[in-house]
Each structure stands twice: as C-alpha cells, then as structure tokens.
Amino acid sequence: MTTWNDYKDHVRKENPEIGRDMDEAVERARIIAALIDRRRSLGLSQRDLAQMCGLPHSSVARIESGASSPNLTTLLKILQVLELTLTVEPVEEN
C-alpha cells in the first residue's frame, strides 16, 4: 500500500464495516470544514453564528470540533445563515 486511497481500499475489502465508518468520518470532516470556511469567509465568529441561528455558542463549538453531530433541522438552520445549500448526489463508483 503506497497511498491513503490504497489503504482505504484495503480496509474496505478486509472489513467493510470499518470502511464505512472511515468513509463517514471523512464525509463529516468535509462538511465541518466547509461550514467553518464559510463562517470565516463571512467574517463571523462562532458566537455570531450561534446567535444568528438561535443556538447556544457551545452547540456551534461542539459541531465545529466534531464533538457532536447536528440534527437535520439544526444543520439546515446553520446552512441557511451561512447562505449554503445541502446537496445530495449518488456516490461515484471507484
């Protein structure tokens, strides 16, 4: 195995459940990074975002740190304030 993708493919073959967990963690990190990048590009602090969404600051901090996952209603509220949209697409086959 020479690359991260090779390793992930190996794990998926050896233990599909761990492979799914790994894929989920990567997807969660991608979403969190997009939220943080957008919040920062708008010049908002976590506290600003929380206030605009009607959430406690601690909730935004936990979501951004990956310590908690927002429910769909909360995620959509955050996306609306950040002027982002949620898109669902089929997974591409490797």
Image (spheres, rainbow, N blue to C red):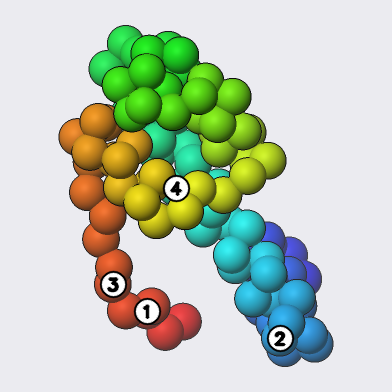
Task: Pinpoint residue 10: horizontal percent, then vertical percent.
Answer: 74, 80
Q: Amino acid at mark 1?
A: Glu
Above or below residue 82? Residue 13 is below
Tell whether label 4 touches label 1 (CB within 8 Å). no
Q: Which residue is mark 2?
A: 16
Is 4 positioned to the left or the right of 46 in the image?
Answer: right
Mark 4 falls on what kind of element?
helix
Is 62 positioned to the left or the right of 40 in the image?
Answer: right
Q: Which mark, by number, is residue 89?
A: 3
**Residue at 71% in and 86% down:** 16
Q: Check disc 4: other Cα within 10 Å, few if <14, some if 14-19, many if 20+.
A: few
Mark 2 falls on what kind of element?
helix
Mark 3 falls on what kind of element?
loop
Q: Quadrant of residue 44?
A: top left
Q: Amino acid at mark 3?
A: Glu
Q: Quadrant of residue 93?
A: bottom left
Task: Pinpoint residue 1: horizontal percent, then vertical percent.
Answer: 77, 71
Mark 1 falls on what kind of element?
loop
Q: Is residue 41 visible?
A: no
Question: How far apart, in angstroms, are the residues tagged by discs 3 and 4?
Answer: 14 Å
Above or below residue 4? Residue 90 is below
**Residue at 26% in and 31% down:** 82
**Residue at 40% in and 45% down:** 74
Q: Which residue is mark 1?
A: 92
Q: Amino acid at mark 2?
A: Pro
Q: Amino acid at mark 4?
A: Ile
Instruction: Say which label, 2 or 3, has the lower sequence index.
Output: 2
